Image (tube, rainbow, N blue to C red):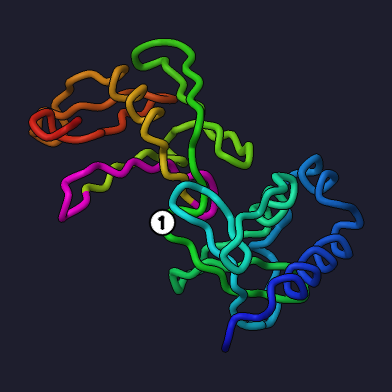
Amino acid sequence: MEPQPIPNAAERLVAGLKAALAGGADEIRARGLPPVHLWNPPFCGDIDMRIARDGTWYYMGSPIGRKPMVRMFSSILRHDDDGKYYLVTPVEKVGIIVDDAPLLAVELTVEGEGTARILAFRTQVDDVVVADADHPLRVAIDPVSGEPAPYVLVRDRLEALIARPVFYELVDLAEEREVDGVLSLGLWSAGTFFVLGPVEVAP
């Protein structure tokens, strides 16, 4: 199905979510995330919306300038079993394009040291997640450039790409440790050791 004109599609999504939760975008954020995993509306096609690798949301090629609107849309984002991304309300489900990860981790807060350390990440839409066994860190290596791409799981198969300055902070905190017989560079958070990469190839 061809992408629909964005203003009409966006208006319907906002209206559907407001009707479901009886409130506006600010109230939605205050109450917490909508239960998108419980909603099973019909698929209504794709809309011309894209999340770029740097975390910017676009309508028809133009960036969305209103952060509250981006926050609202991010709250109804879902990553389904088919590997695609959708915006979901109780009455409709529409497909969007995500260049890499749908979220971007832009800030790191560190508490404690060693095995007691807690690493908390804030995304570009102000989600906050602590790296732990349920929200793991992972590092993918680009097969062409060899560049590392670090991610943290935020919720429900939605990952945040960790911004390069934040990744450098992680590397500065990292320690060497043997994991599965390989000397690796990694760090602790919430009692779990996360590997950034083998010592010989880690940045």
Q: Quadrant of the C terminus?
A: top left
Image-based side of 198 in relation to 189, left or right: left
Image-based side of 85 in relation to 203, left or right: right
Amino acid type assigned to the residue bearing label 1 in the image: Asp
Q: Residue at x 21, y 51 (%)?
A: 142
| Residue on which the image places disc 1 | 100
Image-based side of 86 in relation to 165, left or right: right
Image-based side of 191 in relation to 23, left or right: left
Q: Magenta span covers which residues?
A: 142-158
Residue 183: x %, y % from top left:
10, 28
Q: Residue at x 55, y 50 (%)?
A: 56
Closest to the observer: 12 or 195? 12
Q: Residue at x 71, y 57 (%)?
A: 35
- Seen in the picture, residue 65 relative to 18 is either above or below; the reply is above
- Seen in the picture, residue 153 relative to 77 is either above or below; the reply is above
Task: State which quadrant residue 144 falls in.
Answer: bottom left
Task: State which quadrant residue 42 falls in.
Answer: bottom right
Closest to the observer: 182 or 200? 200
Q: Residue at x 70, y 44 (%)?
A: 67
